[in-house]
Image (cartoon, rainbow, N blue to C red):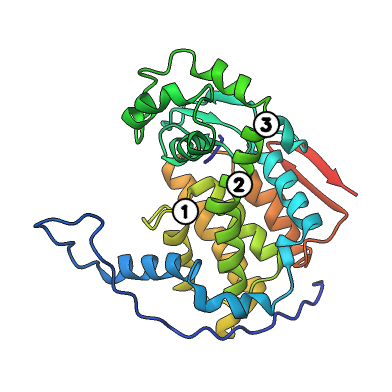
Amino acid sequence: MKRAGLLLFAAVPVVVTATVYVLAPAHSGTKTASRPSAAQQARQDAKAKAVRSEDDEVIADLPPGLAAPAKKELAQRIVASAENSTLDWRSAYGYIEDIGDGQGYTAGVIGFCTGTHDLLTLVEHYTAAHPHNGLARYLPALRKVDGTDSHEGLDGFPAAWKAQARLKAFRRAQDEERDRVYFDPAVRLAKLDGLGTLGQFVYYDAMVFHGPGTGPNGFHGLRERALKEADTPSEGGSEKEYLDIFLDVRRKAMKTKKPGIDTSRIDTAQRRFLYDGNLGLDTPLEWRVYGEPYRIP
């Protein structure tokens, strides 16, 4: 999930009707789920907002934004500059290593991790469609190490991953899981918040790096903190001001967790696009990540 003068833009206000959700316990049994705090409820509601069907009509009436094929390709290239130090994002399907961040192996096109559940889910879904794949035998071990940085039971797993990544079916499975967990929910929620293409990318990159969790350091927790300081465009706020604050919140979270972390994916990439007034994320684009320059004409 992780690696180590304005151009005027008119955001179309989006009116979203609040919906009350009743959350059932995850498991049936004698114990009932404790009532969530106000902060927890806000995060859960935000996550639900990213998928609820009653917003489909609202989304359908909005411009495609980052979901347009050319913009989506652009998004993958920018993320790859931070995740893999390349614009060739397709070269990362077979990538796998432990980068020492406490998340176990980081692998694949979006940095799925053995310690953060998304890699396990990917292999489970892939195995359901392709039962005899070369990663299926590692499922018991992947379930055991989920949530830890352990490699126990994963001897030979990196080689098996690389071999599987040569298959079109597994590359397609990675794309589908990336879209299901990260891209589609991020873009959808950004649109409902009234954000344009750059804002949708800002949400997507944050979702990739911080994960889609509802905890304080997950994407939804970061969004909640930003909302305390600024209104989204759908609430009548300034898009530039809101995004600036969201990036501030995200940068602070990164530095708090790891003081020496490089935050150039924000400082000299997304913040540069924002301060240039490029809310449409229009090319040409120039930015720097980890000191390396990138350009897309």
Q: Amino acid at mark 1?
A: Pro
Of residues 277 and 75, the one drawn nearer to the viewer in this rendering: 75
Q: Amino acid at mark 2?
A: Glu
Q: Secondary structure at mark 3?
A: helix
Instruction: Classify residue 193 as left or right of residue 124.
Output: right
Alpha carbon separation for disc pair 2 and 3: 15 Å
How packed is label 3: few (under 14 Cα within 10 Å), some, or many (20 or more)?
many
Q: Amino acid at mark 3?
A: Ala
Instruction: Classify residue 75 as left or right of residue 36.
Output: right
Q: Residue at (34%, 75%) from the top-left corner?
A: 21
Residue for badge 3: 92
- Which of the two labelled residues, at mark 3 and mark 1, occupies the earlier sequence position? 3
Q: Is residue 162 visible?
A: yes
How packed is label 2: few (under 14 Cα within 10 Å), some, or many (20 or more)?
some
Quarter holding residue 228: bottom left
Q: Which mark is residue 212?
A: 1
Q: Are marks 3 and 1 in contact (CB under 8 Å)?
A: no
How many labels were placed on the picture? 3
Residue 289 vertical position relative to residue 246 in the rendered view, above or below: above
Point out residue 154 in the picture as x, y percentages from the top left corner.
42, 18
Alpha carbon separation for disc pair 1 and 2: 16 Å
Residue 236 vertical position relative to residue 119 in the rendered view, above or below: below
Q: Nearer the viewer, mark 1 or mark 2?
A: 2
Q: Residue at (41%, 31%) from the top-left corner?
A: 102
Quarter holding residue 283: bottom right
Q: Secondary structure at mark 1?
A: loop
- Which of the two labelled residues, at mark 2 and mark 3, occupies the earlier sequence position? 3
Q: Are marks 2 and 3 in contact (CB under 8 Å)?
A: no
Residue for badge 2: 176
- Which of the two labelled residues, at mark 1 and mark 2, occupies the earlier sequence position? 2
Point out residue 142 in the picture as x, y percentages from the top left corner.
39, 28
